[in-house]
Amino acid sequence: MDVRFDRIGRLQENMRAQGLVAIVVLNHDDFIYLFGEDRTQPRAIVPFQGPPEIIVFTGEEPELLAALGGAAQEGRVRVFRSVGGQINDVVTRIRELAAAGGAAGLPTGSSGKPKVGLQMWFDTPAFLVDLFRQVNPEVEVVSSDPVMDPLRAIKDPDELGLMTEAQRLAGLGMDRARQLLQPGVSARAVATETLYAMMRAGAEGTSTPIYVNFGPDTCMLHGRVSGHPLERGQMVIVDLTPRIGGYCANLARTFVAGLPDERQTNLLDTYREMVAAVRPRMIPGVTVGRLDEAARAVAENHGLADYPVNGIGHGIGLRFEETPASTIIPPHRNLPLREGMTVTIGHTVLAIPGFGGARFEDVYLVTPTGAQPLTEYPIEPSLAV
Amino acid sequence: MDVRFDRIGRLQENMRAQGLVAIVVLNHDDFIYLFGEDRTQPRAIVPFQGPPEIIVFTGEEPELLAALGGAAQEGRVRVFRSVGGQINDVVTRIRELAAAGGAAGLPTGSSGKPKVGLQMWFDTPAFLVDLFRQVNPEVEVVSSDPVMDPLRAIKDPDELGLMTEAQRLAGLGMDRARQLLQPGVSARAVATETLYAMMRAGAEGTSTPIYVNFGPDTCMLHGRVSGHPLERGQMVIVDLTPRIGGYCANLARTFVAGLPDERQTNLLDTYREMVAAVRPRMIPGVTVGRLDEAARAVAENHGLADYPVNGIGHGIGLRFEETPASTIIPPHRNLPLREGMTVTIGHTVLAIPGFGGARFEDVYLVTPTGAQPLTEYPIEPSLAV
């Protein structure tokens, strides 16, 4: 277990600056980022100063201590074991930290109470947050985004290495999907074989279900596995999201089972041109909202102004969608990109309802000269059938 | 899309009795239960009376209307389409329903405001609930459990059919795992091949990661995929959770790579005896807490009193853990079982920290004569290696 004391130190600086007495970690992504490894039930407290504290059940303690090497004995990590009294232990600890934060002069929240940060994305359960608020009435629960995002949004070389590998695995999966996309194949079979190919090559699984959509189902904003077999002439969207070391990939391609007709060709060409228009614009300082405008202008030029282009890209890393993620958190539309962010282009489906949709999505690194793809995967929509 | 008007009608009766003006559905399990099919982004409002309302993005509307057959045209389901204004539309609708509930004399919540129910389990994101509260200050958000649970906890024949099939798929996966469990194999390879076998046979995926644990890792309460290859003489736990039609299975087996030694034999025999002690006691009216006591007594008889037995079983259905789920929601420890509930036996790991743990978990139907397993899968721990 490679505890990332460097990242924890920078996080604690941010916490002191913004007045968070503690962050309570309940999510895999923050846990991996700080402790260099996942646990099935990730639970930790990062105080505003001093060693981070990992919470485990008694039965899992020997394994955790072994994984930590000497770090627990040396006092660089506290291990906080518990059978059933976790809630009481956490309450006691939060009270201590609230008092220590007051003594250290940390600024309080809008309620006048000490602030404790929790991640506020899809994987933080409402009932746990409500319970936390109820048993810790002397603190104010705030989103940990403002202290975590400045760190997590910029990827270091270790992270870029894993993300590039995840994207390579997605390419292997897409190769396998292409082989199978023949008239009569079921979307379920394509999804099963594609997942298997990626897992055999090292993927831990995927961060979303594998989407394999045929015909009008290609319009679905969120994809699914189509129910009917592939027919000659239909459009196909395959969207793959393998993970490795917790890091997410995102590779989507649109195919046509045969030669595209005129309307399909227009959709596909438009999308390709949208991506080409966005890539050089994806430089530090530009907002995702502006990227959408560039994409939308291309769609308008192709007579597709009626079909919405919302959120052409999103941040990606240890979460499948992370900052900037304008389709989840509308204010992110105005967030300026920064060098070292990893952002997809190709998230939105350009869809003619009832007819079909297109997407070509890859993961890019934001650089001063525009978006650099982590891997190159061909865009060749026409399938020989 | 087989909208379950029967279930929706019973739900609305419960809502009127308990004073909920609406339930906002944000989760796959409730959506499948009410609408007979999943959507990638499940969003619906069930008002206290009148047709249910499904919310989709514009691009997905043609597909939804087709799936609904005539139900939308006939006014039996309302379709609530939106591009980006979903939040405003929902706020307007919730206000209308709050007023209608007041006019109909529905009881209000403890705050004196009309009550709106949301599911409060792991998959309801805290930030969405906070946002909902913020934009709907005139209503009180409450857990929808008290109106949903009386319906969902008792499984009808359709549900039992799917759950039995899911459990059969888990058995196929376990067969595949057994074939591969030889010294030197990696847990990752076992997990990959097992998932593939289950998906080829029809599983949609799994409701948890596949856990394949070797040696001391078998103590982990929540399992994982072990990092080191299997060694001769080690204990192994494989825990499989395939889904079909959204319904979950749960099958766990403990193996030994070779002949069990004395301590391993004692753990395995104890667990088998615990299951045998719990099965006849799993009858209507008994609480999960009492089942734990019966299991604990067996452990004590075998000299294993020091190792905790908490939550020998949990409810299972469209959620992997649902009511009763005493390890998630402590008051469920005192909930009486009812005929027709589906509950696992074998959830807790009987673990000697640093040495190893055992579990044999299956899904059972609660009947007046005790627990009836949905499928029979052999308990044969010793592997020929």
Image (cartoon, coloured by chain):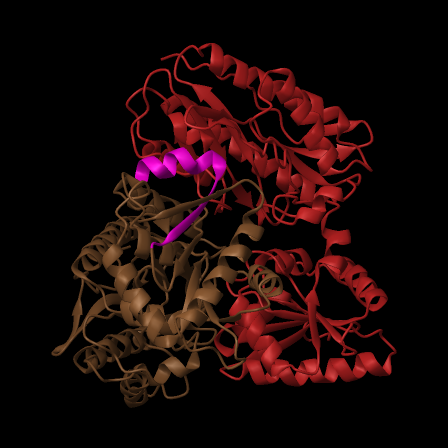
Chain colours: A brown, B red
The residue sitting at 60% across, 23% down in the picture is B305
Left or right of residue B4: residue A229: left
Position in image of residue B232 (x %, y %) = 33, 16
| Front residue (pair B184, A362) | B184
Task: Please give left or right for residue B123 compared with residue B18 in the image.
Answer: left
- For the C terminus of chain A, the quadrant is bottom left
Residue A319 on image: x %, y %: 36, 61
The percent position of residue A120, horizontal first and vertical second, equals 46, 68
Image vertical order of residue B102 relative to residue A157, above or below? below
A375 or A173, nearer to the observer: A375
Q: Considering only vertical position in the picture, is B163 above or below A171?
A: above
Q: Is residue A159 above or below residue B178?
A: below
Dividing the picture into quadrants, the one containing residue B282 is: top right
Residue at 38 percent across and 25 percent down: it is B215
Q: Provide the residue span drawn in magenta.
A: A51-67
Residue most toward the front?
Answer: A103
Looking at the picture, tell me which residue is in the foreground, A128 or A58: A58
Residue A184 visible within the image? no
Q: Is residue A55 magenta?
A: yes
Considering depth in this image, is B100 or A153 the residue closer to the camera?
Answer: A153
Regarding residue A330, the answer to whether it shows in the image is: yes
Corner quadrant of residue B187: top left
Q: Quadrant of the N terminus of chain A?
A: top left
